[in-house]
Image: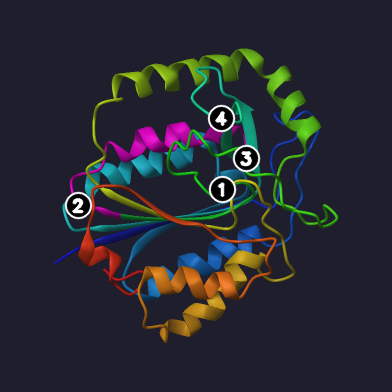
Amino acid sequence: MASAYSLSIGLNKVDPAHYNGWDGALNAPENDARDIHMLTKSLGYSGDLLIGNEATRENVISAINGAATNLKEGDMFVLFYSGHGGQLPDLDGDEFDREDETWCLYDAELMDDHLRLLWHKFAANVRILVLSDSCHSGTVIKLRPDGGRNSFTDYLPRIGVKTIPVELALSTYIVNKGFYDEYIRQVDMQKADLKDHEINATVRLISGCQDNQSSYDGTFNSSFTGALKIVWNGGKFSGNYTRFHSEIQQSLPSYQSPNHLVEGRSNAAYDHQVPFTI
């Protein structure tokens, strides 16, 4: 019988000591993470909840590595993140927009390229579902060289937007330049070593928005997580992942359009399952 594990991450604030005085205050992400944690637990998942100052880069990477070690063929892993998206410079030049997208964890940012490295650690045919309720998260699970070609479509006042402001993305990088340059260099070296290696797990992303859009905060839940909960309807939803994504998309305004993509080994059975199926 398959096993299932979920890791739910939510940050209402980050550590100003790392982010050049910015605490990134949001309202709903920690509640988002609690809700997804409870949803998966109700379905029989084992799981961990990392919120606030527990959602450090080390703790998140350690938990994902633990999942990669413990999950076997046919098992299920749900990785949920709610918080700010960020950017770091693309030093090896493999991104069209010359930026690597990040999750802003409590004490430091975690790059999309690093997440991609972690997928290589999972056994064949492990099913991974990543739900990323953050800005510019449309391709956070994989490299998309053309990811910056589309013009920015978010035209609303930037209130409750779940992204690190541009000027703070730069200043955070500058004040931590030695740390980030070495981090990026190490990830790029490992990525080059794995260039010709396939990801044997099946990694599915349903993101809060496209790469050129923003995700939005809310009162009780962030916009994407709130829409997901409405569509899930306490477990009454009976469609597959394509329909799940489509109905979430229909529940959100046009300026916030969730993405759905799959990386790694094809898995037709996974494609046709009801979301969160163990």
**Residue located beneath label 1 in the image:** 137
Q: Disc 4 designates what residue?
A: 96
- Return the mark for residue 125: 2
Residue with the most extreme right position = 157
Q: Label 4, label 2: how many angstroms apart (C-alpha)?
A: 30 Å
Query: In the rendering, at what x and y percent does residue 48 appear?
Result: 43, 56
**Quadrant of the image for the C terminus?**
bottom left
Q: Does the magenta stretch include residue 111?
A: yes
Contact check, label 2 and label 1, Cβ < 8 Å: no
**Which residue is nearer to you in this view: 195 or 21?**
195
Q: Relative to 273, is 123 above or below?
A: above
Residue 121: quadrant of the picture: top left
Where is residue 26 drawn, in percent x and y?
74, 54
**Residue 148: image location, x then y, percent:** 60, 37
Q: Name the residue under label 3.
A: 106
Residue at x-position 24% and y-position 42%: 69
Q: Is 201 on the left-hand or right-hand side of 47?
A: left
Q: What element carries label 1?
A: loop
Query: Could you tell which of marks 1 and 3 lies nearer the N-terminus?
Result: 3
